[in-house]
Image (cartoon, grey):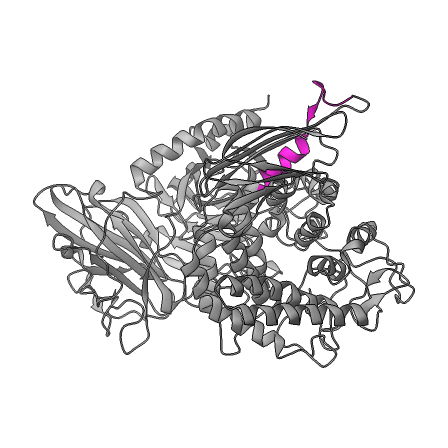
């Protein structure tokens, strides 16, 4: 075993214990439970505070402090905290929380924290680092202006209220490092990096022993502090945080892959072997995490006054043609990526940590010293992300060729295990205070991505809180035309009408999996506004007319010729079968919701509209000679997308659907009217989710596993998360490509809700060439466990275990078995 492999094995073994330790020491993870006062319907006595002279809407990093005296160690000290853009809170020198959860100004989150475990008798120091990234703000970060707020929950805690007794200091050690599209030659909107000049940094500012006598008194913001819905002016409408605090635990790099003008042993990666870079030297160290991660890198250095350390982060290295290729390769490849910088002050054990997390597999340290050597003492990452717990499990096996079933020689399908593990890592890295489309480039919560991510969350973790927040975020994003924005929260306005439709579908998904009628009902006005926007743009032909905004469907090639922007199918102006059928797909789901809430007449109207559009699409776009649905009435182009949606909406007769799917999976566009198109436009990783759903609907679930070849290809290319699209890809981590996790449980294991709220279950497994399948997933009432094995005669054996109060059915090749709570043996 190599040293790097040994390090990885050791770290995997001890990480869970390290997380428990760090959570108890720092307070990260979920803070102690508190029973707070309701601050959502009254003005707050505490005031937003800011620096008295610094511009409130420009770049700046600030430190706030207040010293309070307590006659005894409290058993409860609950405060409500927020800031704009963000804060990191310390109590007596210990970091205890970060926030606020991202949102918009009229739904500005505050955290409720119990600080008692970190406080003591006598003198206590509350301190917060607050920052505003100014022009270099991430697109995902909305803002009003710089400010900090702390409200004590009761009479004891009101001593902590932010007012003029708090002190403030502007930290001029910070300046932004541009990491924009011009620099990285791709679409990246994750914000600026950090440059810290240690000479100007007020080291120890958060500790009780620091002397803050030269600090200024904080300035009060000019308007009262208010929750959402109160007040005569805008600024921040405060709402309580609805999701847990992010987890944080240490993670270490796995290997030194390259050294220039210096030597670094594997001991440095463990924090046991400092590295000295000589004076007047430029040294470069390329380090490999072994897999992609999201973390706050913490670099500790000594001496080396004036030395500049540049930290560069990348998902992969690139060759001379700017291609990533195999992600494990470093020879002949260069580093290009997001950067931070630290300028040393010559003192001992100074630690640099950026304000926001970084995404990397590869981290390169470039050290440029002057007259004094610099000592690299340690480099450790603090992993961060939404605290999802992996509760679901999946495993499968196949028999050796020619071996009868069942057989003890069945072998575990290791590629499915790898797809599961890498898919779950992908989903984890794309979830924080919101879902992210990708953690490296954008960190934006797009509807199309989030619908898939939410289903993964429900099936693998059972945690629905981030999904619920996302649904609410999109409802808040709606603008005067009635559509949602395509991504939200976002400081940059963008509209994708198809994503507004998928928001409606996402509400339907939530309704099918959770009992939360009041919340779902509150979405109906927004749903109706989305449906109306699309209906108003139908023409007399029954297809959509000219559509404004960005009508993205998939990163399919060559979809850009008509509009000049990627991802838009043909027919956005003349009428598109794809866009029209997505309306139908949504109308049917919206009708289910409306009927559930007693709006039966309206529900039937949308069902009838859907059926009418289906007929119009089939009449105008079906190519009888080729047996395919065309993208437009001109029948010049054909795609998997149109035919997938035709199956999902029943725009083609049910009896033809299986054969249609088999045809499009073969990839041939043999319709005689196809013009200069010898193959169907293929669904990429994103839209394959809908292909998988169509296979499930048409009874072709056995075809799902063979469709996973692109995921196996990604593993062979050394990816440790799943990419945005086929090579060459921008993003190596896109959660929409983690959809196989959901499908392995919902198709292969066959577990689906049979009625709203998951009040009953329908299980219809599709093993394909697999011999055995074992799966388990969380349910609101407990856990669903299935163990299936094919019999030599083609039957199904095994067991199903349901929560005590859950019932359902098991189906296999036309036969049905009634299921009840508890464990039952299967023999069909």
Residue 421 placement: quadrant: top right
Judge whether residue 267 is colored magenta.
no
Inspect this view and state whether residue 560 appears: no
Image side of residue 771 versus residue 15, left or right? right
Q: Is residue 416 magenta?
A: yes
Q: Residue at the left extreme?
A: 71
Q: Which is nearer the eye, 772 or 320? A: 772
Q: Which one is nearer the viewer's eye here, 203 or 492? A: 492
Q: Is residue 309 left or right of residue 333?
A: left
- Asked if residue 780 can be seen in this view, the reply is yes
Residue 154: x percent and y percent?
15, 55
Report the residue at 69% width, 75% height from top. 544
> How many numbered dots are placed on residues in this image?
0
**Observer-nearest of 815 and 438:** 815
Counting from the top left corner in percent of width and height, residue 775 is at: 58, 34
Residue at image coords 39%, 40%: 300
Q: The C terminus is located in which quarter?
A: top right
Looking at the picture, does residue 684 appear above or below residue 502? Answer: above
Q: Position of residue 117 (x, y in %)?
A: 22, 40
Question: Viewer-proximal residue, 186 or 437?
Answer: 437
Residue that extends furthest to the bottom in the rendered view of this protein: 540
**In the picture shown, does residue 204 fall above or below 654?**
above
The span shown in magenta is 404-423
Quadrant, the N terminus: top right
Q: What x and y, as percent, mark residue 818?
A: 59, 37
């Amino acid at each position: 075993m190599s040293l790097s492999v040994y390090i990885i094995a050791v770290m995997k073994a001890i990480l869970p214990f390290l997380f428990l330790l760090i959570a108890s020491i720092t307070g990260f993870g979920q803070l102690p439970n508190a029973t707070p006062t309701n601050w959502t319907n009254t003005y707050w006595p505490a005031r937003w505070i800011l620096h008295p002279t610094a511009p409130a809407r420009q770049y700046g990093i600030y430190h706030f402090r207040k010293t309070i005296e307590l006659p005894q160690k409290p058993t409860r000290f609950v405060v409500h905290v927020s800031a704009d853009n963000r804060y990191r809170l310390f109590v007596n020198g210990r970091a205890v929380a970060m926030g606020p959860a991202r949102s918009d100004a009229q739904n500005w989150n505050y955290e409720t924290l119990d600080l008692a475990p970190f406080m003591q008798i006598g003198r206590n120091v509350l301190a917060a680092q607050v920052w505003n990234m100014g022009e270099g703000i991430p697109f995902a970060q909305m803002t009003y202006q710089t400010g900090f707020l702390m409200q004590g929950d009761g009479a004891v805690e009101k001593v902590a209220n932010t007012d003029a007794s708090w002190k403030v200091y502007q930290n001029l050690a910070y300046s932004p490092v541009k990491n924009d599209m011009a620099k990285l030659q791709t679409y990246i909107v994750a914000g600026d990096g950090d440059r810290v000049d240690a000479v100007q940094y007020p080291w120890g500012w958060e500790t009780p022993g620091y002397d803050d006598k030269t600090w200024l008194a904080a300035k009060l913001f000019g308007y009262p502090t208010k929750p959402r819905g109160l007040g005569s002016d805008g600024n921040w409408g405060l709402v309580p945080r609805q999701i847990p605090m992010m987890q944080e635990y240490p993670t270490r790099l796995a290997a030194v892959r390259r050294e220039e003008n210096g030597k670094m042993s594997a001991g440095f990666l463990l924090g046991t072997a400092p590295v000295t870079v000589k004076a007047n030297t430029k040294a470069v160290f390329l380090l490999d995490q072994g897999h992609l991660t999201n973390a706050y890198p913490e670099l500790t250095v000594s001496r080396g006054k004036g030395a500049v350390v540049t930290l560069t982060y990348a998902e992969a290295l690139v060759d001379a043609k700017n291609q990533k290729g195999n992600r494990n390769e470093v020879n002949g490849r260069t580093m290009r990526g997001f950067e931070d910088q630290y300028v040393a002050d010559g003192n001992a054990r100074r630690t640099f940590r950026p304000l926001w997390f970084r995404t990397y597999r590869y981290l390169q340290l470039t050290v440029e010293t002057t007259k004094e050597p610099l000592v690299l003492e340690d480099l450790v990452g603090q992993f961060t992300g939404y605290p999802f717990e992996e509760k679901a499990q999946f495993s499968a096996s196949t028999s050796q060729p020619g071996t009868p079933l069942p057989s003890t020689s069945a072998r575990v399908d290791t590629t499915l295990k790898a797809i599961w593990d890498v898919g779950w890592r992908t989903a984890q890295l794309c979830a924080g205070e919101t879902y992210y489309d990708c953690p490296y480039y954008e960190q934006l919560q797009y509807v199309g991505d989030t619908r898939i991510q939410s289903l993964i969350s429900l099936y693998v973790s059972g945690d629905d809180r981030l999904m619920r927040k996302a649904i609410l975020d999109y409802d808040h994003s709606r603008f005067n035309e009635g559509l949602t924005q395509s991504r939200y929260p976002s400081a940059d306005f963008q509209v994708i009408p198809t994503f507004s439709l998928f928001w409606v579908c996402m509400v339907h998904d939530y309704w099918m999996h959770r009992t939360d009628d009041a919340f779902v009902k509150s979405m109906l006005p927004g749903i109706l506004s989305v449906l109306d926007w699309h209906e108003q743009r139908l023409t007399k032909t029954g297809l959509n007319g000219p559509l404004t905004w960005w009508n993205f469907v998939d990163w399919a090639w060559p979809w850009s010729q008509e509009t000049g922007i990627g991802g838009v199918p043909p027919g956005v102006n003349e009428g598109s079968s794809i866009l029209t059928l997505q309306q139908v797909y949504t109308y049917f789901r919206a009708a289910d919701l409306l009927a559930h809430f007693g709006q039966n007449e309206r529900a039937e109207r949308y069902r009838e509209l859907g059926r009418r559009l289906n007929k119009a699409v089939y009449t105008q776009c079906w190519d009888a000679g080729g047996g395919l649905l065309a993208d437009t009435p001109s029948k010049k182009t054909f795609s998997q997308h149109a035919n997938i949606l035709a199956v999902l909406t029943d725009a083609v007769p049910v009896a033809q659907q299986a054969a249609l799917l088999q045809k499009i999976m073969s990839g041939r566009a043999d319709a005689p009217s196809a013009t200069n198109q010898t193959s169907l436009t293929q669904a990429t990783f994103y839209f394959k989710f809908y292909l998988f759903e169509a296979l499930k609907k048409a009874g072709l679930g056995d075809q799902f596993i063979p469709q996973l070849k692109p995921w196996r290809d990604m593993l062979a290319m050394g990816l440790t998360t799943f990419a945005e699209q086929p090579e060459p890809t921008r993003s190596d981590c896109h959660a929409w490509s983690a959809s196989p996790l959901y499908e392995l449980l919902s198709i292969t294991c066959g577990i689906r809700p049979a009625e709203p709220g998951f009040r009953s279950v329908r299980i219809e497994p599709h093993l394909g060439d697999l011999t055995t399948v074992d799966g388990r997933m969380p349910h609101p009432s407990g856990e669903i466990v299935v163990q299936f094995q094919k019999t030599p005669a083609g039957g199904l054996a095994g067991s199903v275990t349901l929560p005590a109060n859950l019932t359902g059915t098991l189906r296999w090749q036309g036969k049905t078995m009634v299921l009840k709570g508890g464990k039952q043996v299967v023999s069909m």
